[in-house]
Amino acid sequence: MSENDMQVPNKPRVLVVVSGGVAYCLADGGVDVALIDYDNEPDAAIEPRFADLLSASEAG
């Protein structure tokens, strides 16, 4: 790992870990995170404040 790889970014970070079909996330403080598992809950509802992010990912 280079020195540049270890520098602290200026943006909040989110790390999503998936292992054995189980996902969890770790985030810096002050980050609003939602994790949705459509594989295990295909009808899971997303909170309205994340709807624009989800629709943007489906369009792209």
Image (cartoon, helix red, strand yellow):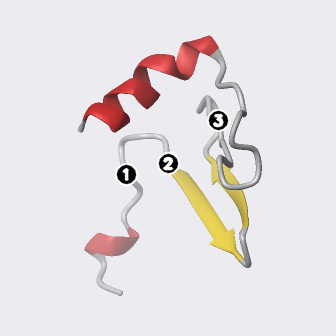
In the displayed structure, would residue 42 be above or below residue 22?
above
* Residue at 41% from the left image edge and 57% from the top image edge: 8
Marks 2,1: beta carbons within 8 A: yes
Which residue reaches farthest top? Answer: 48
Q: Position of residue 29 (x, y in %)?
A: 65, 37
Q: Position of residue 59 (x, y in %)?
A: 27, 32
Badge number at residue 13: 2
| Three-letter residue code for mark 2 | Arg
Measured Cα–Cα span from mark 2 to mark 3: 13 Å
* Residue at 35% from the left image edge and 37% from the top image edge: 57
Which of the 4 quarters of the picture holds residue 11?
top left
Whichever of callouts 1 and 3 sits on the residue coming sooner in the sequence is 1
| 10 Å crowding of disc 3: few (<14), some (14-19), many (20+) | few
**Which element type, helix, strand or loop, lies under badge 3?**
loop
Q: Which residue is mark 3?
A: 34
Q: Quadrant of the C terminus?
A: top left
Which of the 4 quarters of the picture holds residue 15?
bottom right
Numbered label tally: 3
| 10 Å crowding of disc 1: few (<14), some (14-19), many (20+) | few
* Residue at 76% from the left image edge and 53% from the top image edge: 40
Whichever of callouts 2 and 3 sits on the residue coming sooner in the sequence is 2
Q: Which residue is mark 1?
A: 9
* Residue at 50% from the left image edge and 48% from the top image edge: 13
Q: Nearer the viewer, mark 2 or mark 1?
A: 2
Badge number at residue 36: none
**Which element type, helix, strand or loop, lies under badge 2?**
loop
| Three-letter residue code for mark 3 | Ala
